Image: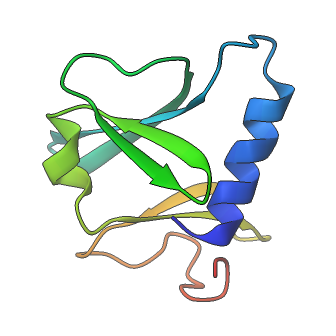
């Protein structure tokens, strides 16, 4: 997870109406067009979750998503080409086309 992604997630958590939010859940699923990623705020770990600590941020990942996310970098871009979270898996380049310039 890049510094930009961590900062963006911290901003989202700080703006959450629910004071119980402790981190972010990241999930991945495989489909005919490749991997699909989902993110959402989370208060507690679920059974069989991997709980990952990144620079003071808590990331929850379910057991099915964990192998799909291995080696994936999560970045946050705010450029004319793309705004939002970008998942740079080991097999693809950044969707914003600026790998190495958006994150750390």
Looking at this view, is 72 or 96 the one in front? 72
Residue 63, placed above or below residue 9: above
Residue 10, image x, y percentages = 74, 45
Residue 99, image x, y percentages = 53, 85
Residue 34, image x, y percentages = 21, 52
Q: Is residue 37 left or right of residue 24?
A: left
Quadrant (top left, top right, bottom left, bottom right) of the C terminus:
bottom right
Q: Is residue 11 left or right of residue 42?
A: right
Looking at this view, is 21 or 93 the one in front? 21
The number of callouts visible is: 0
Q: Is residue 20 left or right of residue 70?
A: right
Picture residue at 31% right of the left edge, 68% below the top = 89
Residue 22, image x, y percentages = 61, 27
Picture residue at 79% right of the left edge, 70% below the top = 80
Residue 29, placed above or below residue 21: below
Looking at this view, is 36 or 15 the one in front? 15
Residue 40, placed above or below residue 100: above
Picture residue at 60% right of the left edge, 60% below the top = 55
Q: How is the image coloured?
A: rainbow
Can residue 83 be seen by looking at this rendering? no
Picture residue at 81% right of the left edge, 12% below the top = 17
Can residue 5 be seen by looking at this rendering? yes
Q: Residue furthest bottom?
A: 100
């Amino acid at each position: 997870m890049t510094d930009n992604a961590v900062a963006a997630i911290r901003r989202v958590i700080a703006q959450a109406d629910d004071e119980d939010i402790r981190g972010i859940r990241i999930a991945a699923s495989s489909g005919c067009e490749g991997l699909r990623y989902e993110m959402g705020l989370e208060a507690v770990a679920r059974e069989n979750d991997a709980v990952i600590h990144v620079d003071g941020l808590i990331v929850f990942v379910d057991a099915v998503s964990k192998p799909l996310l291995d080696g994936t970098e999560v970045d946050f871009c705010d450029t004319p080409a793309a705004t939002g979270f970008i998942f740079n898996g080991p097999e693809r380049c950044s969707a914003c086309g600026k790998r190495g310039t958006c994150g750390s």
